[in-house]
Image (cartoon, helix red, strand yellow):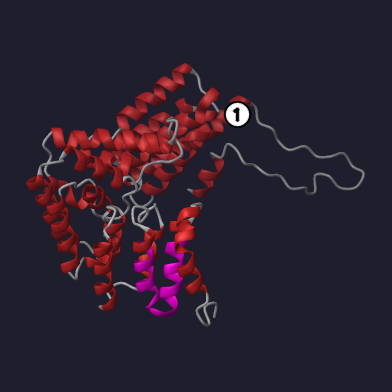
Amino acid sequence: INALSRSLQTDHFSRLGGVESQGSRSTLMDFNPTYVEGIEYWKSSIIKLEEVLIEDTNYRSVAKEILLQKLAGLVRNRSLHLISPSIYKILEVLPESRLEVFRATNKALAMGGKFISEKEEYELTKLIEASKPQSFSERYKLFLAVPDYHYTTAKSFDEYLNEIAKKMAQEFIETGLMWSDYCEHFLKLDQQGGYIFGKHIGELLNGNTEYINDIITLSINELKRIPIAERNINVLKGIISSVHDPKLRSEIITLFFSDDDINYFTVEILSSIKPTIEELFQLFMIVDKEIITIEALAHFKYGKALFHLSPEEIIKFCRKISSYGHNGIWTALAIIFMYCFQNEDRLKACEIFIREILLTKDLIL
């Protein structure tokens, strides 16, 4: 089967010198098939792979992967007609591979460019429509949880992701989908576009305190059921970042701090909601419990998370961090460095404290 994969290779060939050119004799020539011979060769390999796909349950997934992998190369060589029946056959034999087929066909269309005719473009578009995911959870996974960064035509990927997240958030709210039915999909494994999706959900629910409370409660209960290594709060973080009600915000933060099963997420939560200095100091409670390390607070150096604080507040926070020994000092330096980066006024206000840290004994050991 792997040999059949090699037979469908259409580019990235290499040729090393060998016995064809030795001594004074004439150089031997490699066999160069005609276009028709090449087409027949590819066709016979595809037929064999389709037979494996249909008849061999042990290796049909291998045949599927080869066919999808070679689709783009064959499209660029004007040979879509050879392989498209086999791609449709994948949808028939392995319907659970719909997302893989959708990604592969989109890739083939994007890479085809000037090499494909209008007819082939039309046929590829039909194949894309046939493999397009239908359910909300499938589309969420494809377009937001694990989006494809390489084959979009948007001006920028951020614009593309934001547009998709906004549309899907509106669909979720306007069609009355239940959070409890999709909660696990939003809180597990990769959630690359989850924060933007959650932020749009939160904005659409702005003022609906009861609904947001229900979402938070359901999500926390679901998080506890998910294995720790698979938990992801990007969607939840986006929703919480959109909460403007001070009372609700305080209740959510208290909820996270008070639950030892999930309070290690508080650094992530606070970094997305412009925390007050009082909220930041609550983190030392879970550091002292050894639920998180002092180095975990270095998360606040990213994304301008503390830029809303005054230099005095930053110094107060970093001074407390630096009291946790060698690792605390380096964590404090990382936070205050990014706070002062390319800002002369902040640097001047924090200069004395930075000098104080840098003069710490055995700092670089």
Residue 264 drawn in magenta: no
Q: Which one is nearer the viewer's eye here, 41 or 198?
A: 198
Q: Which one is nearer the viewer's eye here, 24 or 104?
A: 104
Q: Is residue 189 above or below residue 332?
A: above
Q: Is residue 341 above or below residue 70?
A: below
From the viewer's perspective, is 125 left or right of 223? right
Q: Which one is nearer the viewer's eye here, 192 or 352?
A: 352
Q: Residues within 10 Å of mark 1 (few under 14, many from 20)?
A: few
Number of numbered discs visible in the structure rendering: 1
Q: Which one is nearer the viewer's eye here, 310 or 279?
A: 310
Residue 321 drawn in magenta: yes
Percent across and percent down for residue 110 are 47, 30
Furthest residue toward left: 210
Q: Residue at horizontal 48%, vertical 74%? A: 356
- Location of the C terminus (image quadrant): bottom right
Location of residue 121 by image quarter: top left
* Magenta extent: 314-337
From the viewer's perspective, is 214 left or right of 131? left
Is residue 108 among what the camera can see? yes
Q: Is residue 119 above or below residue 246?
A: above
Q: Residue at horizontal 57%, vertical 36%? A: 10
Percent across and percent down for residue 46 are 46, 36
User: What residue would you read off at disc 1?
Assistant: 37
Location of residue 321 by image quarter: bottom left
Q: Secondary structure at mark 1?
A: helix
Percent across and percent down for residue 41 are 55, 34
Overall secondary structure of the magenta stretch?
A: helix
Q: Is residue 212 above or below residue 289?
A: above
Location of residue 109 by image quarter: top left
